[in-house]
Amino acid sequence: MNGPSIAGHARQFAVAWFTHPESRAPAVQLALSREGSTRFNEPIAIDVERPVGRPAVAVLKDGSTFVCWLRHGEADAQLRAARVMPDGRIVAQWAIAQVAPGRASGFPRAVADGSGVIVSWTSGRARQLRVRAVRIAFGN
């Protein structure tokens, strides 16, 4: 299942999901709530290049959102990340790690940790799988 990920902090919520309708290219999308509301703004296309999907999202205490997902690479896949401000601006996007392209790579997880985020993912292949984690700090 390549389902959605939802997170919140205070009165700010974010939902990230993978979509691949027959009529369009695959995409990882993100929707942010309007502050203090159950209504969401229009989705933001986070990755439309070669996403595998499997998004994870965390809302930081400053109201910004961290989202990570898998993207097809040449030989392997990449665990990618982006930071999105409350107004929908993508202020940074980068690769965190190379991962196996198949199902063995699992689903990344993200949790807010103060002014940063802790991200975990599965690394390796077959009988050599390992769980990896990194803390990413954001200065304000």
Image: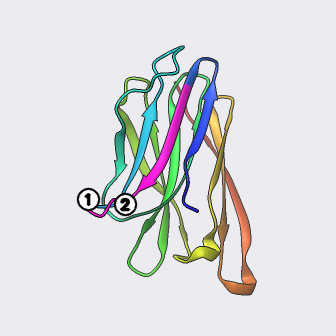
Residue farthest front in this picture: 22
Seen at 54% across and 60% down, the residue is 2
Q: Amino acid at mark 2?
A: His
Which SS class for mark 2? loop
Q: Is residue 50 above or below residue 68?
A: below
The residue to which callout 1 is attached is: 24
Q: Is residue 36 above or below residue 107?
A: above
Q: Is residue 88 above or below residue 121?
A: above
Q: Is residue 72 left or right of residue 10?
A: left
Q: Indicate which disc residue 20 carries.
A: 2
- Around disc 2, counting alpha carbons within 10 Å, would you say few (fewer than 14), some (14 to 19), or many (20 or more)? some
Q: Amino acid at mark 1?
A: Arg
Seen at 62% across and 29% down, the residue is 8
Task: From the top left corner, tell me how far across and down residue 34 is, in percent.
Answer: 45, 19
Residue farthest top in this picture: 36
Which SS class for mark 1? loop
Between 102 and 38, the one nearer to me in the picture = 38
Task: From the top left corner, tell me how far across and down residue 105 is, in percent.
Answer: 61, 71
Q: Are marks 1 and 2 in contact (CB under 8 Å)?
A: yes
Q: Is residue 111 magenta?
A: no
Task: From the top left corner, tell me how far across and down residue 27 is, in percent.
Answer: 36, 55
Quarter of the image where one finds residue 120: bottom right
The span picked out in magenta is 13-24
- Around disc 1, counting alpha carbons within 10 Å, would you say few (fewer than 14), some (14 to 19), or many (20 or more)? few
Task: From the top left corner, tell me how far across and down residue 129 is, in percent.
Answer: 72, 77
